[in-house]
Amino acid sequence: MTGDTILEVSGLTIALPSGGDRTTAVRNVSFEVGRGEIVCLVGESGSGKSVIAQGVMGLLPKQLPVTAGRVVLQGEDITHAPLSRLRELRATRMSMIFQEPMTALNPVMTCGDQIDEVLREHTQLSAEQRREKVLAIVKEVLLPDPERMVASYPHQLSGGQRQRIMIAMALVLDPVLLIADEPTTALDVTTQAQILKLVLDLQKRHGTGVLFITHDFGVVAEIAHRVAVLRLGDLVELGPKDEVLKRPRHDYTKMLMVSVPKLNTQERPVDAAAPVVLSVKALAKTYDDKSWFGKRRTVHAAKGVNFEIRRGQTLGIVGESGSGKSTVARCVVRLIDPSGGSVRLGSDEIATASAGALRPLRKRVQIVFQDPYRSLNPRRTVGEAMIEGPMNYGLAREPALAKARELLQLVRMDDSAMQRFPHQFSGGQRQRICIARALMMEPELLIADEAVSALDVSVQAQVLKLFEEIRSRLHIAMLFITHDLRVASQVCDMLAVMSKGEVVEYGPAHRVFGAPEHAYTKALFAAAPGRDFAFGA
């Protein structure tokens, strides 16, 4: 351990409860984090990344004991430190930023009080001194109107603002080690770029060592000094960023690099004679937002949206959070009622159709959501979940079961899945099941709303390939909503870029990606992390 080494993890082994598919969550893992260095831990879900972070912070549950190895923070072995000592170290010498700030923050405390709580617990500062320090750190993380921010509750802030509050809490006492566990996964590219720049700036200013956990290799390419690759609890590769990402040695790392979606600007053949499946004209969705003080404001979630999708074609909608992407999708499916405009499925109008007229139209449009676990009933087997829709429309049970087996094979799932429950599958497998369930209705239009954003890069690549195969084999129209530009470039023929409820750019995907015209589109593409990085294989 050198004088500049902040964290030393050596031979760390963490056990799993008996009865699992392996005996250890992490096995004999060793790495270091130096002062002013960013080390990225990467690997698929279940590789042990978050378990290591929790082990360093002393947050592991009793079912996951450290059975071998050491965790040393600035020369102090904290592997089996008592809880009282760990509480002293947290926030003062090591801090952690969690993936989802909305669940990590207390919903009934103001943001200022939550930052102040750290100071009350760990310092002897007066109330006035603490308030000055709270406002100073809120300014440092570049939040607008610090007085308003510290008086606000978490639900009153955007996702990016909540994440900045989390960073402020983590850094208010200048810890030497910062652990960031997927802090940008749920953010759109522009907010993500701002958060990454903020972490880099603060890290340089404070000389903090950062252990950054992510499955986004664009982020790794943007910020890492060194990269540690984990597979099923084993550290399979460790080295400088360029060496690992451009010249990977281990087969697993090579597989991950091949799976990273590239920004594709090649023209995709489009059948201009194919019939129009979905036509959206002047679509609008307006909300009247009334505050506690009686003030009313009108929010245009969608305004004057126009596009069409032909049979066998995929249209992508990209934009920041709050741009109106999901609002448009929900209007198309009539999960919410449009305020104006037309949504035509073939020759049938969806926007103004009555409940009775909608029923036969619903089977023609199906949607795959972001979180497959929330989309499936945990108490129903996969088979029962898949046959429910067709049976509601009159298909007999046996033909429905036969159809379910056929579609599971199409999405590369075994027939045995029919008898199992959602919790018995991985995230990627659950998403395949949701796709197969949507196809049970033989839809003319399939909507994918952020359907791959929560998946590991390798699983994401498999699901994207599956979408392409389904589109070409079944020749259905697809509406693909995503905030990941590289993903959109892989599957979309046409692209609509949305900002503040409006489509600001629309055209063939290769043209929009290759030569964007609108200033917002250019800014969106420029913010994509690792956009120009050449990943090896």
Image (spheres, grey):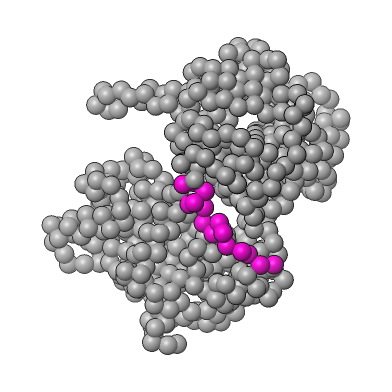
Kindly give the residue lying farthest to the bottom in the view shown.
Answer: 2
Q: Camera-side residue: 328 or 289?
A: 328
**Quarter of the image that includes the C terminus:** bottom right
Residue at x 28% of width, y 67% of height: 173
**Quarter of the image that includes the N terminus:** bottom left
Query: Magenta stretch?
Result: 523-537
Is residue 144 located in the magenta-colored stretch of the structure?
A: no
**Is residue 271 rendered to the left or right of residue 152?**
right
Question: Residue 204, how many percent across, how many down?
Answer: 36, 69
Q: Camera-side residue: 531 or 410?
A: 531
Residue at x 52% of width, y 79% of height: 31
Residue at x 64% of width, y 15% of height: 349
Q: Is residue 234 visible?
A: no
Residue at x 53% of width, y 26% of height: 305
Q: Indicate whether 476 appears above or below 43.
A: above
Q: Indicate whether 480 appears above or below 280.
A: below
The prevailing secondary structure element of the residues shown in magenta is: loop
Is residue 528 located in the magenta-colored stretch of the structure?
A: yes
Question: Residue 317, how many percent across, how many down?
Answer: 58, 37
Question: Residue 242, how many percent across, how many down?
Answer: 57, 72
